[in-house]
Amino acid sequence: MPKFAFIYRDANPPSSPEEGQAHMEAWRAWSSGLGDALIDPGMPFSQMVRVDKNGIEKWEGDVPLNGVSVVEVATCEEAGAMAASCPHLNLGGDIIVAEGMDMEM
């Protein structure tokens, strides 16, 4: 079955500890509702560096990516429907749903 990444972007941080706690409770409820489809809850991102052929530099400014999770479902549409109820959207961000490709390494 295909795997899909939920790539979380551009969310505003919670405005208070209470809002942060409420968001985490909503996140836990949403993610546990995905059941066995959620194969990697992923992780949120904080600090970043940018790497190119000229070297490594600390990312300055807004963090464009907030995190990533992985689900395993039959179609991109099914994955999109799962993402549509994610509490990340309540923080003003969006979610890119991208199908992964299996590659032999």
Image (spheres, helix red, strand yellow):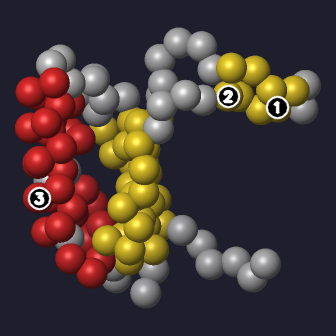
Mark drawn on residue 29 = 3
The secondary structure type at the circle numbered 2 is strand
The residues tagged by marks 2 and 1 sit, at their Cα atoms, a distance apart of 10 Å
Q: Amino acid at mark 1?
A: Asp
- Name the residue at 17% across, 31% down: 20
Query: Is the Cβ of the residue at disc 2 closer than 8 Å to that at disc 1?
Result: no
Q: Which residue is disc 2 drawn over? A: 49
Instruction: Determine the secondary structure under disc 3.
Output: helix
Along the horizontal axis of the image, is 84 left or right of 93? left
User: In 3D space, how far apart are the residues under numbered discs 3 and 2 (Cα atoms)?
Assistant: 32 Å
Give the residue type that dot 2 points to.
Val
Tag 1 residue: 52
* Location of residue 1 with respect to 91 vertically, above or below: below
Q: Quarter holding the C terminus? A: bottom right
**Mark found first going from the N terminus, 3 or 2:** 3
Q: Position of residue 24 (x, y in %)?
A: 18, 44
Q: Is residue 57 left or right of residue 62?
A: right
Residue drawn at 63 percent across, 20 percent down: 59
Q: Residue at x 90, y 32 (%)?
A: 53
